[in-house]
């Protein structure tokens, strides 16, 4: 028994010694003029996370923030021997209210803090597809295509090329609609071609049957911010905003106006992103 108490005493002393040494090192570090300078300014370089927003219309994702890692930043500057803001080390901070796993609400746009938009097309046949893909390639713009599973079965090579060119290919239903018996099949078919698992369903208008079905399979439902039809350029010009999800019909008017529309959006300072990018909370906003 005496040996046990002796061993416990030694262990206690060792633990206390480690704790005491760590506290001394911490005090010494915090007293270092370099750390004092870091502590006086580091908050100026942090970016708070932006919460997701839930409205009656649907969900707008938040954006992760940036928090300074004081220990790693100090170590970097200590090696240099002086303060240098470029050596700050950051870690991402997630929003308190996140859009992650919010399957029961429609995504209606990307975060307004980002100066980006997303073009969305529904593909059920080949009408105007080649021309639209050609324009996107010429303008170096990526888009998201919700493709019909029945069409994909006959156009696997086209789907492969679309994904290869940087476009996002998502599940647009099967034979014109979403159905339980075909949802997983179409997902697997697209994934086998693109090596990317589809994560979104799409509806131009509120459709709770789509929302309920896709949420069951842990897929997000998307509804466009801007819905265009016969006059896409004028419609977008009147309604353009940061984070907009822009629905474009596969028709002659879109094929005619798409190039001009892209030029206009670029002139307004917007970038083009796929849905997966514009709806992601990864990355941070500019201060």
Image: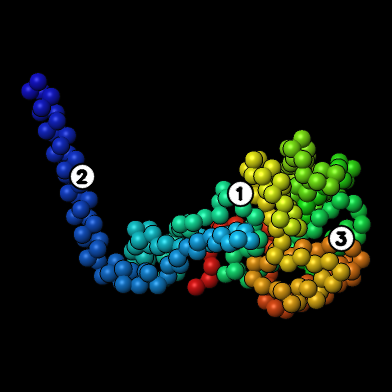
Instruction: Tell whether label 2 touches label 3 (CB within 8 Å).
Output: no
| Labelled disc at residue 86 | none
Task: Where is residue 127? Give x, y as percent.
Answer: 92, 57
| Left or right of residue 107, residue 262 in this image | right
Query: Which residue is rendered at x = 31% and y = 68% of the image?
Result: 39
| Labelled disc at residue 250 | 3
Q: CA distance from mark 1 to mark 2?
A: 50 Å
Q: Residue furthest top?
A: 1
State the image quarter where residue 86 is shown.
bottom left
Label 3 vs label 1, nearer the camera: 1
Query: Which residue is rendered at x = 35% and y = 72% of the image?
Result: 41
Q: Which scheme is used to colour this image of the protein?
A: rainbow
| Labelled disc at residue 18 | 2
Q: Few, some or many C-alpha atoms within 10 Å of disc 2 (few <14, some 14-19, many ≥20)?
A: few
Q: Residue furthest bottom?
A: 267
Task: Where is residue 19? Give x, y as percent.
Answer: 20, 46
Q: CA distance from mark 3 to mark 2?
A: 68 Å
Label 1 vs label 2, nearer the camera: 1
- Whichever of callouts 1 and 2 sits on the residue coming sooner in the sequence is 2
Query: Which residue is rendered at x = 22% and y = 50% of the image?
Result: 22
Provide the residue designation for mark 1.
104
Q: Residue furthest left?
A: 2
- Whichever of callouts 3 and 1 sits on the residue coming sooner in the sequence is 1
Instruction: Tell whether label 2 touches label 1 (CB within 8 Å).
Output: no
Numbered disc 1: secondary structure: loop
| Left or right of residue 225, residue 145 in this image | right
Q: Few, some or many C-alpha atoms within 10 Å of disc 3 (few <14, some 14-19, many ≥20)?
A: many
């Amino acid at each position: 028994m005496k040996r046990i108490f002796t061993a416990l005493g030694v262990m206690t002393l060792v633990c206390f010694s480690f704790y005491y040494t760590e506290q001394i090192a911490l005090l010494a570090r915090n007293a270092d003029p370099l750390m004092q300078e870091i502590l006086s300014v580091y908050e100026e370089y942090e970016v708070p996370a932006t919460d997701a927003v839930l409205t009656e219309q649907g969900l707008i994702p938040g954006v992760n923030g940036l928090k300074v890692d004081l220990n790693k930043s100090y170590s970097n500057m200590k090696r240099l021997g002086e303060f240098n803001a470029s050596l700050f080390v950051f870690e991402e901070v997630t929003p308190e209210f996140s859009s992650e796993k919010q399957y029961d609400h429609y995504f209606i746009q990307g975060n307004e803090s980002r100066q980006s938009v997303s073009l969305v097309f529904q593909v059920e046949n080949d009408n105007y597809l080649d021309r639209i893909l050609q324009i996107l390639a010429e303008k170096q713009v990526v888009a998201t295509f919700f493709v019909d599973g029945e069409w994909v079965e006959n156009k696997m090579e086209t789907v492969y090329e679309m994904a290869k060119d940087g476009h996002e290919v998502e599940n647009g239903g099967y034979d014109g609609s979403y159905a339980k018996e075909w949802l997983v099949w179409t997902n697997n078919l697209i994934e086998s071609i693109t090596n990317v698992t589809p994560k979104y369903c799409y509806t131009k208008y509120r459709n709770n049957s789509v929302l309920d079905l896709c949420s069951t399979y842990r897929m997000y439902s998307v509804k466009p911010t801007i819905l265009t039809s016969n006059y896409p350029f004028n419609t977008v010009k009147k309604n353009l905003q940061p984070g907009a999800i822009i629905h474009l019909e596969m028709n002659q008017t879109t094929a005619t106006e798409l190039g001009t529309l892209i030029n206009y959006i670029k002139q307004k300072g917007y970038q083009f992103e796929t849905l997966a990018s514009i709806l992601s909370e990864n990355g941070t906003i500019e201060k």
